[in-house]
Amino acid sequence: MKKTLLHYLIFSCLLALVLVGFVYASSPIDKKQYMTVTVASGDTLWGLAKQYEPAHGLSPDEFIRWVVDVNRLPSSRLTAGEQIVIPVLKSKQDGSLAVKR
């Protein structure tokens, strides 16, 4: 009986941790904190990643994945005139990176 109760308690705690982690990981990003750029003809996500590299501190692959996910882009291809949010804080007064690894 005590073993069953202990197993139930451990299982419940683990399940709670998984659920909390899932909720935290799926929290939406507040896009208002980040820069919005208008895509120019010839722009690529790789080029934007390199252009803003000092401000975001991500690898180009991480930058591209962030932009595609946050903007819900169907692919990593950009269209001129399109507005996208990039992982660069609008206000960087504290000098911190926009996205923590």
Image (cartoon, grey):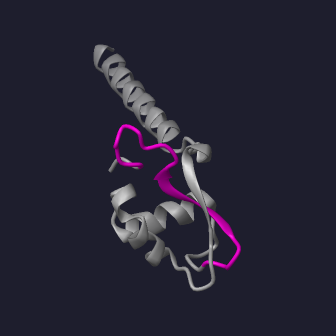
Q: Which percent across, then down, holds residue 11?
A: 38, 29
Q: Which of 59 and 3 is in front in this view?
A: 59
Determine the residue positioned at 33% across, 14% down. Answer: 1
In the displayed structure, does residue 4 sit left or right of residue 78?
left
- Percent position of residue 2, x then y: 30, 13
| In front of the other: 76 or 46 | 46
Q: With respect to residue 97, does 51 lie above or below?
A: below
Q: Give the range drawn in magenta.
A: 78-98
- Residue 44 on image: x %, y %: 52, 79
Furthest residue to the left?
3
- Residue 62 appears left or right of 84: left
Write down the quadrant of residue 35 in the picture. bottom right
Residue 82 magenta-drawn?
yes
Q: Does the magenta stretch include residue 57?
A: no
| Picture layout, residue 20 above or below residue 99 | above
Which residue does the image show at 47% across and 68% down from the upper left?
64
- Secondary structure of the magenta portion, mostly? loop
Q: What residue is at 52 percent from the left and 47 percent from the top?
A: 90
Task: Please name whichever residue, 8 or 22, is drawn nearer the observer in this view of the structure.
Answer: 22
Name the quadrant containing residue 3.
top left
Residue at point 36% right, 48% down?
Answer: 97
**Outermost residue, right side:** 81
Q: Please provide percent x and percent y for residue 18.
A: 43, 37
